[in-house]
Amino acid sequence: MKLEGKVAIVSGGGAGIGLGITLCLAEEGADVAIVDINEETAAKAAEERIRILMSIQGRRTVDNMARQLGQAMWEHCGMSRNAGGLTKAQGQIQELKEEFWQNVLVPGSDRDYNKSLEKATRLADSLDFAEVMLLDALTREESCGGHFREEYQTEEGEAKRDDVNFCHASVWEYDGEENPPKFNTEPLEFENIELSQRSYK
């Protein structure tokens, strides 16, 4: 817990990349305050989500499902990943997400401090975030930095970038529950350096 005891304020933390940052900070132990442009809408959305979570009364605990999510991501979306594993994980996460909203058990009440409910809301967000992580890793057909696609490496096992198709900054945009996220890119332009293949030797 690198950020335990620290407080982070995330502007626009109710959705999109802001939500992703919020989750990362929370996972590192920070107390996160979300600042959203529409407080009323955000509050209503949170209340409805809590109502649904409390009403399911399924058979699987949040901790049990969280371990399954973590295992799938650890096995197939670590630093070294490949298309087969990523595709397999997409199916696993989709099945887990469907089961979560039908079979999760959140004991207690929403009127008092409820640690299980807090975990359930975080897991719901983490399932969405995992889907985007897998989609991004599968879409990025190159190796670079902490993203090592096993199909894209040199004969010496070094990361093989694709600067023609992936020299850009990118972000996935939420486009509604029924639609896939939109992929937005902004080209990176270098004036004073020339891109070259990196060697870690």
Image (cartoon, helix red, strand yellow):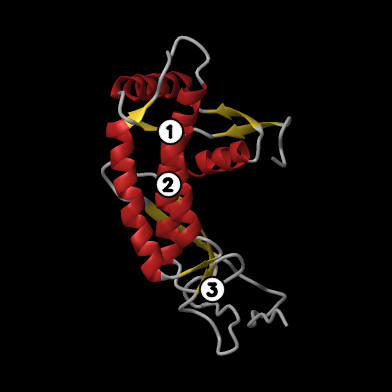
**Would residue 50 be seen by someone viewing this image from the given angle?**
yes
Residue 98, relative to residue 137: is it above or below?
above
Which residue is identified by label 1? 62
Give coordinates of residue 73: x percent, y percent.
47, 54
Secondary structure of the residue carrying numbered label 3:
loop
Q: Which mark is residue 143?
A: 3
Task: Report helix, strand or loop for mark 2.
Answer: helix
Quarter occupied by the N terminus: top right
Q: Amino acid at mark 2?
A: Gln
Q: Residue at x 65, y 40 (%)?
A: 28
Q: CA distance from mark 3 to mark 1?
A: 34 Å
Q: Amino acid at mark 3?
A: Ser
Quarter holding residue 105 = top left
- Rendered image: mark on residue 68: 2
Please give left or right for residue 130 compared with residue 97 in the image: right
Please, what is the three-letter code of the amino acid marked with disc 1? Val
Q: Earlier in the sequence, mark 2 or mark 1?
A: 1
**Inter-mark Cα distance, 2 to 1:** 10 Å
- Label 1 crowd (10 A; few <14 / some 14-19 / many >=20): many
- CA–CA distance in space, label 3 to label 2: 27 Å
Q: Which quadrant of the rendered structure holds the C terminus?
A: bottom right
Does residue 69 appear left or right of residue 155 in this picture?
Answer: left
Q: Earlier in the sequence, mark 3 or mark 1?
A: 1
Question: Where is 49 relative to 152, above or below?
Answer: above
* 54 vs 49, nearest the viewer: 54
Q: Earlier in the sequence, mark 3 or mark 2?
A: 2
Q: Residue 83 appears in which quarter of the rendering?
A: bottom left
Residue 99 to residue 83: above or below: above
| Left or right of residue 174: residue 9 | right
